[in-house]
Image (cartoon, helix red, strand yellow):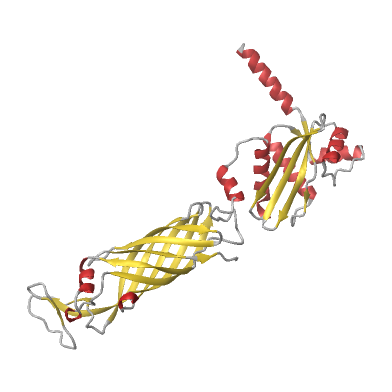
Amino acid sequence: MKKIILTVLCLLGNAIYSQKLAVFDLFTELPDMSPSQLGNLVRLEADKLGKYEVLDRFDLSYYANQKNLKISDCYGKTCMEENGKALGVDKVLGGSVEKLGDIIVVNLKLIDVDSAKQEKSLVKEFVVPTTEIKAIIELSLREMFGLENDTELMKKLTNKATFESTLSHPFAERLNLNGPRMGFTCFTGTTAKILHASKNEGGFEARPVMFQFGYQFETQYLNEGNYQGLLEFIPTLTGMDQGMVIPSISILNGLRNNKNGWEFAFGPTFNLVRMGTGYYDSNGTWVYLSGSNKTHPTGTELEKRLDSRSDEVSINPGFIIAAGKSFRSGKLNIPLNIYIIPAKHGLRMGASFGFNGKRKK
């Protein structure tokens, strides 16, 4: 019984494959793509599916000349059906590929010649440029014939909400997060204690949680597959809510996922702060040495630390590790990030968000 079933299936498979398919020119006004070129592309991709015996372009041209058929402008169902009968094929495939604004619309139809009925059809919209026409035709044919497709690739080619890559938007709009940034930063450890201390003790009489405002400049040096390589330059001002101005600059290198907007970055950060010279006495109390007199008791060491009484402004380096996600609403991008800066005198951490609109390149 199994042998009989297998034999029947093999016969059916051979019968289907032995059916002849003629692919006619497809109507198109795409730049650098004629109806004949588009027809040849569809013909090649249809042949790859292995479902029919596809007439190649040379056989199609030969039979058309022999029978005086006009197949160059044959786009309608009636014309395709009549030419299919004259060619002696079982199926004919045709349609159109048109560009409507920023969208490419593929319209394919498969006609059974004997029954004169439209057996299969497909109308599909794509949001990629015409340079991806081969992928567009391949995915369209596989979908029309019920074959498995690359779902991620189809999503990139058809879904406007998908984060961009060079595949979906190689020339025009890419996710670029240049724009303002704002948020807060939190100091811990010794640094937090100094900030909170009175000015008589060299403190700043400030809370260790401060508002930040800045601007992010971003360059994408890699945009392939699912990821973008990023170089970010972020100048910020901290502490304005408490009467302080702490300027800083961060230079970050990182990666962003094109599909979901998650990103990770790290790099050096530099800020300008008041640093005073002094020493800690035997009771652990900080003694600030002002002026040119830098003498200190034997057994103590001079060192520098934050001190509001000092006029000396120094560059304080650090290393920042950041992560975040970019949310999108139409053409508005909303990045949300958290970061951490390890340091000898206390950890610094914070969060920021921003916004920007997409620009065409």
Number of residue marks: 0
- Residue at image coords 61%, 62%: 172
Residue 41: image x %, image y %? 73, 45
From what the image shows, is residue 236 above or below residue 13? below
User: In the figure, is residue 247 to the left or right of 113?
Assistant: left
- Residue at image coords 12%, 84%: 295
User: In the figure, is residue 72 to the left or right of 200?
Assistant: right
Residue 80: image x %, image y %? 83, 39
From what the image shows, is residue 231 above or below residue 19? below
- Residue at image coords 82%, 32%: 116
- Outermost residue toward the bottom in this view: 292
Nearer to us in this view, 52 or 210: 210
Residue 255: image x %, image y %? 45, 57
Position of the C terminus by quadrant = bottom right
Nearer to us in this view, 93 or 255: 93
User: In the figure, is residue 215 to the left or right of 38?
Assistant: left
- Residue at image coords 26%, 71%: 207
- Outermost residue toward the top in this view: 1
User: In the figure, is residue 37 to the left or right of 272?
Assistant: right
Position of the N terminus by quadrant = top right
Residue 275: image x %, image y %? 24, 78
